[in-house]
Image (cartoon, helix red, strand yellow):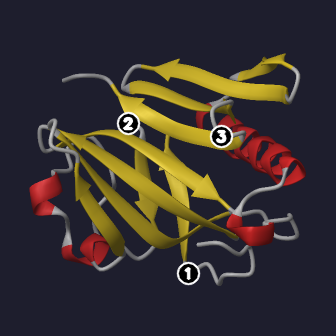
Amino acid sequence: MTSASAEPSKPVTFDATDGSIIIEGLTAKIGPEMLATQLPDDLAAMVSSKRDMGNGWVWVNVGGAALDGNPCTFSLGFLGDHLSEVCWSVLIAGADYTGGWSSPEAVTKEITFMIGVLSQAFGPGQLPGRGAGESARYAKTLPWGTVWCELDPRGSTSASGLRYSAP
């Protein structure tokens, strides 16, 4: 997805009790019980790519979702066939995505938006930034794992996701 004008289709919500992700209209929740080899058919229909890293990790990219009306994609990280990590990217309506990349202003808007979404879903977790270019970040540890949003300094992009604790 390279344009914020892309039409979002399925609203997404988070369940703070177990860290699952609910995509409206799907029968299954995305959560730690999910297996890469047994994706539900309705979720499999939203998969845009799948990549086996050759080191025990398999990454499955899912599109066609929306967070509060903004298009988003998910990368599901399976380690040893079990869902271990979920990362996502959101495009904010009206933000500058010239050439398919987020402008610095768009990155700030993405982080601010995600801090609001995560705070509403999981409770307070906003933290001060760690230096120039990062005004705020979010991190919260819960019984099932960790959720975060921050500036990824390697690419000056917004990074959001959650990691499930080992069973």
Q: Nearer the viewer, residue 154 or 16?
A: 154
Rendered image quadrant of residue 25: bottom left
Q: Which residue is mark 3?
A: 155
Q: Nearer the viewer, residue 147 or 60?
A: 60
On the image, the x and y values in percent for residue 94 come to: 88, 70
Q: Quadrant of the N terminus?
A: bottom right
Report the residue at 36% width, 26% height from top.
144
Q: Amino acid at mark 2?
A: Asp
Report the residue at 20% width, 76% height from top.
41
On the image, the x and y values in percent for residue 118 come to: 65, 39
Q: Is residue 116 visible?
A: yes
Q: Amino acid at mark 3?
A: Gly
Q: Earlier in the sequence, mark 3 or mark 1?
A: 1
C-alpha gap between disc 2 and disc 3:
30 Å
Assign a secondary structure to mark 3.
loop
Q: Earlier in the sequence, mark 2 or mark 1?
A: 1
Q: Is residue 30 left or right of residue 9?
A: left
In the rendering, which numbered label is found on residue 18?
Answer: 2
Q: Which residue is mark 1?
A: 9
Report the residue at 78% width, 47% height from top.
107
Number of numbered tags placed on the structure image: 3
Q: Nearer the viewer, residue 142 or 58?
A: 58
Q: Amino acid at mark 1?
A: Ser
Q: Is residue 63 left or right of residue 50?
A: right
Q: Nearer the viewer, residue 131 or 149?
A: 131
Q: Is residue 78 left or right of residue 98?
A: left
In the rendering, which numbered label is found on residue 137?
Answer: none
Category of crowding for the residue at label 1, using alpha-carbon neighbours closer than 10 angstroms: few (below 14), some (14–19), many (at least 20): some
Assign a secondary structure to mark 1.
loop
Q: Earlier in the sequence, mark 2 or mark 3?
A: 2
Which callout, 3 or 1, points to the residue nearer the camera? Answer: 3
